[in-house]
Image: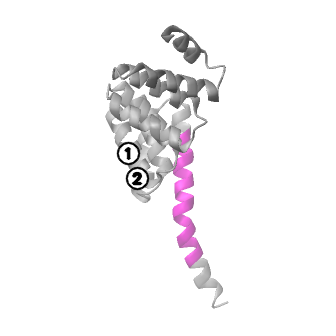
């Protein structure tokens, strides 16, 4: 009996943070489903305060911030998330889309290339890299190469088909 009590106390202490996170995450998810983005952002911030290395919370808070019109805050969250988890192509893709939205085409292009490095099978990353080359007025062979790679991954990518046809 003497050994069970300390074990239970340690187990409770270790799982308390996890269960609290789970309850908060459920609450944030519910707010998100109801389009209550500010409330979801607040709860996700609580999760981040509890665990500053919770990459999932940064990613989801970035989405809530973007829904609230705070694109720069969303980019900051994704940048922090990438520092924690640099192997997730989704992080780079979303940040690339936000950089594109803020007309920071060179950083968007860099992120789309990173997506292609991590996940060559992402047709949209190739497509958006082609769009960034166009915005940056780069050589057309770079645009065509990205569009061809997009179509190699997804031969039915309608926008890439049309754009490649118009460039020839």
Question: Circle 2: is it few (<14), some (14-19), or many (20+) Cα within 10 Å?
Answer: few
Residue at the image point whose x is 33% and y is 27% from the top: 102
User: Does residue 74 sit above or below 52 in this rendering?
Assistant: above
Residue matched to label 2:
83
* Label 1: which secondary element: helix
Whether residue 40 is visible to the viewer of this picture, yes or no, is no
Quadrant in which residue 95 is drawn: top left
Residue projecting furthest to the bottom:
2
Residue matched to label 1:
79
**Magenta part, dominant SS:** helix
Whether residue 61 is visible to the viewer of this picture, yes or no, is yes
User: Residue 101, position in %: x, y?
Assistant: 37, 25
* Label 2: which secondary element: helix
Magenta range = 10-29
Colour scheme used in the picture? one colour
Q: Nearer the viewer, residue 92 or 61?
A: 92
Residue at the image point whose x is 44% and y is 46% from the top: 58
């Amino acid at each position: 009996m003497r050994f069970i009590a300390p074990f239970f106390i340690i187990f409770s202490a270790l799982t308390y943070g996890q269960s609290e996170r789970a309850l908060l995450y459920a609450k944030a998810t519910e707010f998100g489903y109801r389009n209550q983005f500010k409330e979801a952002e607040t709860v996700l911030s609580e999760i981040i305060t509890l665990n500053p290395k919770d990459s999932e919370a940064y990613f989801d808070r970035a989405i809530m911030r973007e829904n609230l019109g705070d694109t720069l805050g969303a980019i900051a969250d994704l940048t922090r998330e990438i520092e924690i988890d640099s192997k997730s192509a989704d992080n780079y893709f979303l940040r690339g889309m936000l950089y594109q939205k803020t007309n920071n085409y060179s950083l968007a292009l860099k992120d789309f290339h990173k997506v292609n490095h991590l996940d060559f099978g992402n047709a949209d990353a190739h497509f958006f890299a082609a769009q960034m080359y166009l915005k940056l007025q780069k050589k057309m062979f770079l645009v065509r190469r990205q569009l061809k790679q997009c179509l190699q991954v997804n031969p039915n990518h309608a926008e890439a088909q049309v754009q490649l046809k118009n460039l020839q």
